[in-house]
Image (cartoon, rainbow, N blue to C red):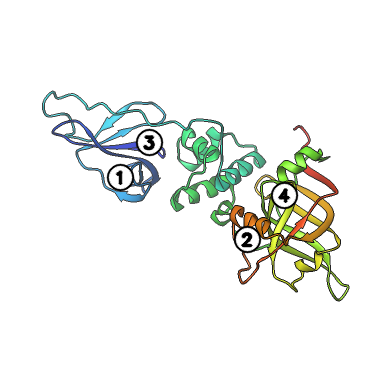
Amino acid sequence: MRAHLGDQLVIESRATGATRRDGEIVGLHHEDGTPPYDVRWSDTDEVTLVFPGPDAHLHHLEHGQPETTPGSARPDTGETAAVPAAASPKGPPNPGDIGRRVAAERDRRRLSREETARRARMSPEYLAYLEDRPADPTTATLIRLADALGTTVAALRGGGFDLPPGQGHALLHPRLRDLSPRECRTLLSTHGVGRIAVSGADGRPAVVPVNYEIVDDEIVFRTAPGSAPASAVGKEVAFEVDHVDEALSRGWSVLAVGPARVVTEPDAVRGLTRRAHTEPWAGGAREMWVSIRPASITGRRITPADQ
């Protein structure tokens, strides 16, 4: 039995020929593809080390052909048991962080998927799966990919996440363009963490991150009385949200400017609390809701010049 990454391992009942369990091979321990394998089981999504027995069959992702272990023919007919085709990803690509980093490194080094897969000793189909889906490859797979791409496992995993963003390579031909008000509102409405620029009680400027929501075109967040964000009440403030894609060296930012007020109506406060997507990450008693009604919204995005 010789497998490739991405192949399907199927365990059958030798008495009935019915499939008992199947999973995807996500890790190899020998260069020639012989057992054992790291298998991600379809029924539990867990990864285990497997030494296939006589009731195991392989379905090769590249060729669509089953392979049996010696002695795995059906006892009643002597024919090889049929194996269902491995499921192919459906829908548009939705890469995870590792997949985006792999694709970005491959693009920077001008390597095709086929050449990268050959260097990493995996099938091109499995590499395509890693790049297009939020996959979770094993350490062994990442080691081979890092070696093939001339980088490190830590870099593919996003090592240095505690460092300020934007330390990756700049695009060869970047394009900085202004966002329309509609694009800005769409990006702003995703909610999450933004930064509010205020002038504190001592008159000194401060920029503070807050968990925010968008409700009826207003930016709302919870804070505590006397805190830096609370000093925004009654003033015109700036609120900024951005996103940096370290893997692809792209990003965008949106800036909203407008007056801030405290929400005092009991029904409105209860409604905001009920609709909130998350609690403030800072914790503690933060029951004061502040609302910013933007008077202006502007934004910019960095993309490759050909897009």
Q: Which residue is mark 3?
A: 7
Q: Residue furthest left?
A: 76
Image: 274 above or below 51: below
Determine crowd level at label 4: few under 14, some 14-19, many 20+ residues with C-alpha closer than 10 A: few
Q: Secondary structure at mark 2?
A: loop
Q: Quarter of the image for the N terminus: give it.
A: top left
Q: Which residue is mark 1?
A: 35
Q: For residue 174, say whether it is visible.
A: no
Q: Amino acid at mark 3?
A: Asp
Left or right placement of residue 298 versus residue 34 in this view: right
**Mark 3 or mark 2, which is nearer the start of the sequence?**
3
Q: Which residue is mark 4?
A: 169
Q: Amino acid at mark 2?
A: Gly
Which percent across, then down, holds residue 109? 65, 41
Image: 16 above or below 256: above
Q: Which residue is mark 2?
A: 160
Label 1 or label 2, whichever lies nearer to me, is 2
